[in-house]
Amino acid sequence: MSTRTRLLLSALACLLCIVIVLSTDQPQRPFQRLTEETIAAFEVETAVGVSATVSDPESLRALAGLLRDMIVYRHIDADGTLLAAYSIFMQDGKEYHLAVYDGFISLDGLSCSADPAHTEKLSVFARQFAG
């Protein structure tokens, strides 16, 4: 095999590696630095339409922990049944809107796949404020 052929094959192998790396799902934690001190309050609405505004420190700590642990994988175009909706009001005035579905979330209108067990935890957490 000539040197030119080897270089061409090496270049093709590198290009293939780059394509594979760029096309794989990179897990992300959009709220990995979130703490209960950065959240002023949150509003939650359950699938049955019950809503509540919550600002007690224990609930803020619980929500921050759930969101810090949430891993999203890739952007998807999904449609499903809404399990819970959160409006999260930050101390710095920012606001986030999180819609929770079975197996994916929508954060400020951007849908991403997520672990169904974790979306269920967020749904169960929301239901505790329904009664």
Image (cartoon, helix red, strand yellow):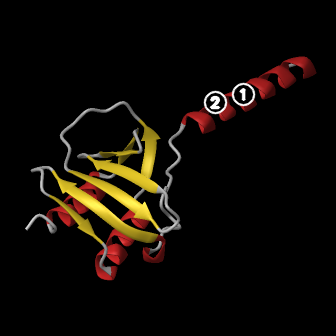
Relative placement, left or right, of 6 versus 61 is: right
Q: Residue at x 15, y 62 (%)?
A: 127
Q: Using the image as rendered, state which of residue 127 and residue 13 is in the foreground.
A: 127
Residue 2 showing in the rendered view: no
- Horizontal and vertical percent position of residue 106: 36, 44
Residue 60 showing in the rendered view: yes
Q: Is mark 2 on a helix, strand or loop?
A: helix
Q: Which amino acid does label 2 sit on?
A: Val
Residue 32 image label: none
Can you identify the residue that label 1 sits on?
15
Image quadrant in which the N terminus is located: top right
- Horizontal and vertical percent position of residue 68: 43, 66
Residue 104, above or below 4: below
Residue 15, above or below 89: above
Q: Is mark 1 on a helix, strand or loop?
A: helix
Q: Residue at x 15, y 68 (%)?
A: 128
Can you identify the residue that label 2 sits on?
19
Q: Which residue is drawn at 50% across and 42% down?
A: 25
Relative placement, left or right, of 64 versus 56 is: right
Q: Can you name the residue that lies furthest to the bottom here? A: 58
Q: Distance between the residues labelled 1 and 2?
A: 6 Å
Q: Which residue is drawn at 49% across and 55% down?
A: 30
- Horizontal and vertical percent position of residue 63: 33, 69
Q: Can you name the residue that lies furthest to the right here? A: 3
Q: Using the image as rendered, state which of residue 64 and residue 44 is in the foreground.
A: 44
Relative placement, left or right, of 56 versus 35 is: left
Asked whether disc 1 touches disc 2, contact meaning CB atoms under 8 Å apart, the reply is yes
